[in-house]
Image: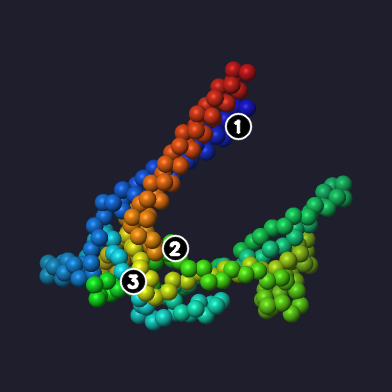
Amino acid sequence: MWFIGVILLLAGAGCLYAAIRQQRLVYAMMAAETLPVPALEQMRAISDELGAGGSFRKICEVVGLTHPGPHGLLRSELTGTECVWHGHRVQRRYKHYQRDSEGRTTVTTRTETVAEHASEAGFALLSDGRTIGVDHGGRRPDGVEQVADRFERSGPGSAGGGWLETLGAVARSGRDETIGYQYTEWVLRPGIQMYVLGEVHDATGSLVIAPPADRKHPFVLSTRSEAQLTASGRTRQRWFAWGGAGLIVLGLVMVVAGLVG
């Protein structure tokens, strides 16, 4: 019993840590200043005048409409949707056969990711008639639109075809039998209101908001508003805190009972 209590204590500590992280994120959003792009350009111009060209840095929030970057509009790989960012995942669903020492076979259904990709090109935000680049740092923006969510069974003539069929054949030659493939795709279309909390810099010449160089500062990229994000953050913080406290109390009781018993 005491061993289960220790596990509950560790789980409770993890919940409390998550609550602290949520609290820090909410405080960071509340403390950061929301700046229009023209104001950031003025700050950058002052930095240049002081001889610090290319060294401008400012932690702040920027709100604007998504806009194509230098590469123009993108097209998602699975559905061909016009967008400024896209990502997709392909998962294989298969039957796994396992025989025990007595010759009995157990069949379980499992899933594995066989392909996952997101666009690398950055995009821009249009704010007050001016644009600022957005470096997403390889992260999927919060609240993006899901445009594909389909399952295709494997087999001759199926839509998966090609290299996916090859994977299925390899799997069937062993102890796995491919059932099919789940295709999921997300996009961020142009003209979507977006909130970004990050670090604005001019290291590449033009202004870009990106993940802060100092990892102590959070990076938020969301189609939700700051008010929505802080409200949900407070809710998660409370649930983590209450859950963590409850797990710790229960864990202590079980550890004490196990040691006494």
Q: Which residue is mark 2?
A: 143
Mark 3 or 1, nearer chain start: 1
Q: CA distance from mark 2 to mark 1?
A: 37 Å
Q: CA distance from mark 3 to mark 2?
A: 14 Å
Amino acid under label 1? Ile
* Residue 103 picture location, percent across and down: 87, 50
Relative placement, left or right, of 77 versus 230 is right
Relative placement, left or right, of 56 versus 224 is left
Amino acid under label 3? Leu
The image's mark for residue 65 is 3
Residue lying at 54% horizontally and 30% vertically, measured from the top left:
251
Foreground mark, 2 or 1, reads: 2
Amino acid under label 2? Gly
Q: Is residue 96 above or below residue 77?
A: above
Residue lying at 69% horizontally and 58% vertically, measured from the top left:
110
Q: Which residue is mark 1?
A: 4
